[in-house]
Amino acid sequence: TYWRAFVIPSGIKKRGLVGFDLRPKNPRNVRQSVLALDSEGKGRTEDSKSATPGFETTGSLEAVTDDYIGAWASSHRPWRTPDGVAKTITSKDRLLVQVQYAPDGNSSDGSFELALYFAKGAKYAELQHLVLGTRELVIPALKSPTLEQTLTLDHDVRVVSVAPEARLAATQVSLDAVLPGGSRKSILRVYPWDLAWVGAYSFKDPPLLPKGTKLVAAVAYENDRHGERQGKVPIKYGPALTDELFWVRFQVAPAK
């Protein structure tokens, strides 16, 4: 498995994105793709350094953008916003498409077609992108910690999609909601976590969470069996596959 990101001019006037699809030339060699906006131009900078289209990543666009849109995979529900909700894109924006390839030893075409779907009018509620996680990440040698990050909602929302990011030492990822009355609701749980089969999850019926709900993102790690180091040294946050990440990105829409 390896990842490559491509920068694509939007070529459109200001419009509200409500969905997208991706059609790989060779579907068996593509496991997943992530769509984001290159809002600060960091993706273009990386792209300019490469002699061929796109630039390599290690499964995350976190180093170049925080403006995540959604993900595509052949076995997952297509990314769509609820009725009356959209993500604004302008002519100045550049799209970032990160593709996870799964080579089979044969030469093949890695190209793809990207379809964008837009709101019919200019009136819509803006899709909001939230993220839980930290760069202050250290997994001690020979330890198996579970790290948590929390966020309390200041208004009623519906959770549209969730996209977790972690690497080789992670074993489980979850997002729970602790409701104002104290009851706990599972929004997403991925176990076992497998970097080669990372997913992003869109809800057919986005769950409603009231104001005051505490969202709890948790990632369980094992630093005693992964890789050649066999847990002999701490694992820290960083860009390499031998480093780790803790991000749970999710999108919310207004409750009404």
Image (tube, rainbow, N blue to C red):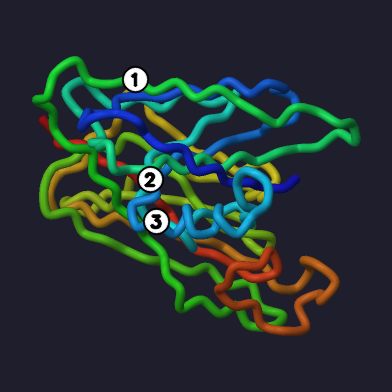
Residue at horizontal 65 percent and vertical 41 percent from the top: 100
Q: Is residue 242 visible?
A: yes
Query: Which of the two residues, 177 or 132, is positioned nearer the viewer here?
Result: 132
Q: Residue 89: x percent and y percent?
A: 27, 36
Q: Are marks 2 and 3 in contact (CB under 8 Å)?
A: no
| Residue marked by disc 3 | 41
Residue at horizontal 51 percent and vertical 76 percent from the top: 137
Q: Residue 32: x percent and y percent?
A: 60, 35
Residue at horizontal 62 percent and vertical 52 percent from the top: 55
- The answer to whether residue 156 is above or below residue 255 is below
* Amino acid carrying mark 1 in the image: Tyr
Q: Residue 249: x percent and y percent?
A: 39, 51
**Among the 4 quarters of the image, the one containing residue 226:** bottom right
| Residue marked by disc 1 | 117
User: Label 3 vs label 1: CA separation?
Assistant: 24 Å
> Number of numbered discs present?
3
Badge nearest the viewer, 3 or 1: 3
- Secondary structure at numbered mark 1: strand
If the image is split into quadrants, where does the N terminus sit? top right
Sequence-earlier tag: 2 or 1: 2
* Amino acid carrying mark 2 in the image: Leu
Badge nearest the viewer, 2 or 3: 3
- Secondary structure at numbered mark 3: loop
If the image is split into quadrants, where does the C terminus sit? top left
| Residue marked by disc 2 | 37
Q: Are marks 2 and 1 in contact (CB under 8 Å)?
A: no
Q: Residue 76: x percent and y percent?
A: 53, 26
